[in-house]
Amino acid sequence: ASYFEMLPSPRGFTEFPAYLYLNTSVPYVEGPPEPLQFYRRWIGPNKPCIIRNAFSHWPIGSYEVISVAVTPNGYADAVLGDRFVMPEERQMRFSAVLDIIEGKVQRKGVFYVQKQCSNLLQELPELVDDLEPHVPWMSAALECLNFFFPSAMTSMHKDPYENLYCVVSGEKRFILLPPTDRPFIPYGLYQSAVYQEQEGGEFQVIDNSDSNKVPWIPLDPLDPDLERYPQYRLARPLVCSVKAGEMLYLPSLWFHHVQQSQGCIAVNFWYDMEYDIKYNYFQLLESLSENTMGPHDMAAA
Ligand SMILES: O=C(O)CCC(=O)C(=O)O
């Protein structure tokens, strides 16, 4: 039975605890915090905040590069009909990407540089000199460093990481949903596929025949289809804008949808979450919710 069949009032179940622990907006913190204080105030309670002046000493320069993700619509890794579609990966010079983004050269599609799981260290060594390899008050060890350059949207998902998301230039707009909203967020299982530009310039969706189905969220929080997913009415999205020089602490397991301004450059630091009692309660909520996911799918969906 689904969560909704088992409990008379899912709203009542999450409303009171949410009222106790959630803010109605994402609060600001001035300057780099003390490690212990940051842990007590934000990481332990699993609450987001925006930190100002946390990396003002980074000398950010200009770079030469790398592999670019290309999609027809700006949605990399998102549900399209009954497919989970990933971007076409293309090798390009950084200056060529800039020309496209600045409109000097016309190209079909939306271009996005997104380096995940520390590829940054191999692919953008020039940038690494301009950053610090970790955030000193967060942890001594860098778990994973990712880099985002314009201009795409990231569909709603969650990660099993504590995320420090630094906007270097431009602005990012986040829609955040707490893990306690899991019952109101729909999931489906999708055939995985990639975009591929054809000779005529159109993009085709090509199936990845050898991969397992991917659990993903079909709902677009910018335009939620409430007829199809009525339970989303009970969700409590927080919207925040992170500007150049600001760092968002995005707690583990929070659902997030991300949009950005033209020319936005961002870097994030991922730290493993604690697989503690909170994680176990989340797993319980997950299994009580409408569930298309097996336990092995949990990690990054
Ligand atoms: O900036 C983006 O487009 C995606 C960021 C994201 O999903 C993350 O940091 O986990």
Image (cartoon, helix red, strand yellow):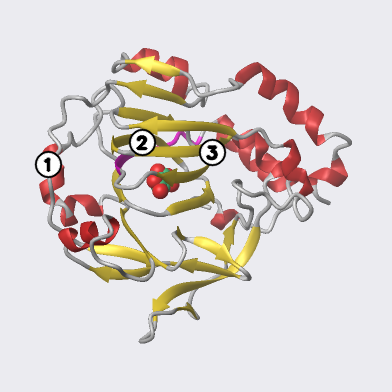
Q: How far across and down, in percent of the image, does residue 151 sit?
A: 36, 53
> What kind of secondary structure does the magenta stretch mostly adopt?
strand
User: Which residue carries the number 1 mark?
Assistant: 61
**Is 200 situated above or below 19?**
below
User: What are the residue bounds of the magenta stretch?
Assistant: 265-275
Residues under labels 1 and 2: Cα distance? 19 Å
Magenta residue check for 267: yes
Query: What amino acid type is highlighted by mark number 2?
Result: Tyr
- Whether the residues at callouts 3 and 1 have beta carbons within 8 Å, the answer is no
Q: Nearer the viewer, residue 225 or 183?
A: 225
Q: Secondary structure at mark 3?
A: strand
Of pointers 1 and 2, the one earlier in the residue sequence: 1
Residue 271 can be seen, yes or no: no
Which of the two marks, 2 or 3, is nearer to us in this view?
3
Q: Position of residue 15 (x, y in %)?
A: 74, 26
Mark 2 vs 3: CB contact within 8 A: no
- Relative to 267, 286 lies left or right: right
Q: CA distance from mark 2 to mark 3?
A: 14 Å
Residue under the point 55% across and 57% down: 296
Q: Quadrant of residue 52?
A: top left
| Disc sitting over residue 175 in the figure | 3
Q: Residue at (26%, 38%) from the top-left corner?
A: 142
Which amino acid type corresponds to the residue marked 1 in the rendered image? Gly
Residue type for callout 3:
Ile
Q: Which residue is mark 2?
A: 165
Q: Image check: 267 left or right of 194?
A: left
